[in-house]
Image (cartoon, rainbow, N blue to C red):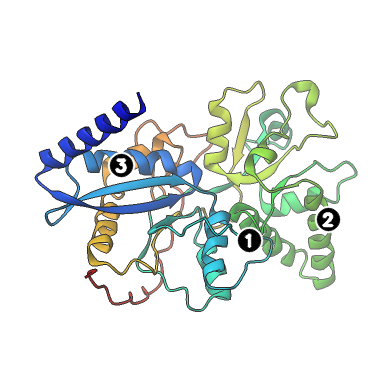
Amino acid sequence: MAIVVVIAGTYLGYQQFAASGCSGSVRLTVAAAPEIVPAVKSVADQWTKAGAAVGDTCVAVDVTEELPATIASAVTRDHSVALIGLNPAPDAKQVPDVWIPDSSTWLLRIQTEAAGFLPGDITSVAQSPLVLAMPEPIAKNFGWPNKQIGWSDLLTNFTAPEPLQVGIMDPTQDASGLMSLLALSQASSGAGGDPIEALKAKSRALTALDTNKAVLREELVAKFPKSEADIGGSNTVSAAPLSEEDVVAYNAERPAIPLSAIYMEPSPAPLDYPYTVMPQVVDKQKSDAADLLLKELQTPTAKNALAAAGLRSPDGTYGANFPAPMGAPKASPAVTPPGPRRPRAPRVRPR
């Protein structure tokens, strides 16, 4: 049976290539953050079925789901450096041709430690705003959706007689956790203009958040109350800075207590999903294939695929059938265009 399956797969693949009028194959490996994988895979599959090719050579695309921390660890391993908080990547973990992490902060962190890390073109292909995820009954007690809630309100919570339990992603392992800390730090700096009070506010926030810190998003969202009786329980969290997509995915499971997405002010930088052509891609055919896939990910079809995955386009708008949380803006602030592109390494064809 296994032999039949292999032969059938090979035959179907041959038929596809033959129908497209191309021959041979250049294979492009893409590693992406889990939440964007369905959209990237959908776009890549449609492209290859339609006869994706570089010149007369067929293009095959392998899209795999990888936590950004895993690929970041593999990249730094290859540069003989390490990022604080990350476990070493196993030798078997290979760096892909194209990497789509959830945030460009991963690229900045790597470049801080590895000056030789010079990827090719970097372009955002999606975004998801950072929100304060909160069970709806608790959010309503805060005045949501009629009251604007800001980062300063979250800081004030930590000084309350009975503060809410607030969770956070480990900032060394997750971009949403890192950006949340940056937003809270900026809010604490404005605490009355007193540097001592600002330091105290920051210290209280960090101490409280460390109690409910999680490495995986699944661990954090599992701490939200499952019923009215769970609200306020010692083993639950009542709020957590997460992405809009996290709230969409959680509510898609139709929980008894859905999450509200509170769009905080000032608005922090969103997850920006940078499409990153990695430095080892020096073959022109593979590089051209990466450029063509990027163009496919910028089409209206791709925008709708992102919407189905709970993600917005880089300009902050969203495609058809996007399950927008209550109070979600029609358009969030656009992703800031990346700075000047670094020159690519010379591209050569293999002999």
Q: Is residue 326 visible?
A: no
Which is nearer the N-term, disc 2 or disc 3?
3
Nearer to me, 134 or 223? 223
Tag 2 residue: 207
Amino acid type at mark 3: Val
Q: Is residue 340 above or below residue 299?
A: below
Residue 241 relative to residue 307: left or right: right
Nearer to me, 97 or 197? 97
Tag 1 residue: 88
In the rendering, which numbered label is found on residue 43?
3
Q: Is residue 303 above or below residue 320?
A: below
Q: Looking at the picture, how far across and down is residue 53, in whole percent?
A: 17, 51
Q: Are marks 2 and 3 in contact (CB under 8 Å)?
A: no
SS class, disc 1 = loop
Query: Which residue is depicted at the point 52% across and 54% down?
Result: 270
Q: Looking at the picture, how far across and down is residue 201, in whole percent?
A: 81, 60
Q: Is residue 91 above or below residue 344?
A: above
Q: Is residue 264 visible?
A: yes
SS class, disc 2 = helix
